[in-house]
Amino acid sequence: MGSMLVNSESPRKADIVLVLAGDSSGRRAKKGAELVRAGYAPRLFLSNGLRFYGLSESEAAANYVVAMGLPRESVVALHESPQSTQAEARMDLRVLREMGVHSMLLVTSPYHTGRATRIFRRLAPDLEIHPVATEDPSWCGGYWWTERECRKTWFFEAVKAVTGAFGI
């Protein structure tokens, strides 16, 4: 039942790496930075989410990956603050199309890869989108049923997948 939520591919060359918002731990941003450093794409785009103590999530993530050694000129912090993955995709895709992006590695948590990929591919059938999952302890390495927090993660993401399929 957990595999229905996951859609992760091996990294491949792309125009950019797009890291989705929603991870205050920095795991997604770190994975995106690793992909850029490994040469899969020349630039890292950081989607925006909430504000923390006056700092946007994307700026906090940009500072984090720059502190890890990624050159600032290869990092783009997006600034719109969406309230859902669908709104995030619409906002991010508008910016990416304006910049001439044709392919991307889409980095997010494993349980979020399936739904996020479906949304991005539906809104951008003209773009090449390859999901890449990062590590996430709230997924328990895919054994989501083994711990309470992981079961909650599965439940909430499964509900979002079902409601999204019905346009709710």
Image (tube, rainbow, N blue to C red):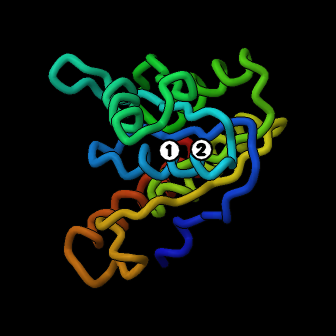
Q: Is residue 166 left or right of residue 65?
A: right
Neighbour class for label 2 at 10 Å: few (<14), some, many (≥20)?
many
Q: Residue at x 20, y 17 (%)?
A: 54
Asked if the residues shown at circle 2 and circle 1 are in contact, with their CB atoms under 8 angstroms apart, the answer is yes
**Rendered position, 118 above or below 1:** above
Q: Residue flagged by tag 2: what amino acid is it? A: Val
Q: Position of residue 19 (x, y in %)?
A: 51, 41
Q: Residue at x 80, y 33 (%)?
A: 102
Report the disc number at residue 162. Answer: none
Q: Residue at x 65, y 41 (%)?
A: 120
Q: Is residue 20 left or right of residue 141?
A: right
Quadrant assignment, res 131: bottom right
- What residue sits right under mark 2 in the picture? 36
Quadrant assignment, res 29: top left
**Rendered position, 44 above or below 73:** below
Q: How many marks?
A: 2
The furthest residue to the left = 53
Q: Residue flagged by tag 1: what amino acid is it? A: Ala
- What residue sits right under mark 1 in the picture? 33
Front residue of 47 and 166: 47
* SS at circle 2: helix
The furthest residue to the right = 126
* SS at circle 1: helix
Quadrant assignment, res 121: top right
Q: Position of residue 14 (x, y in %)?
A: 75, 43
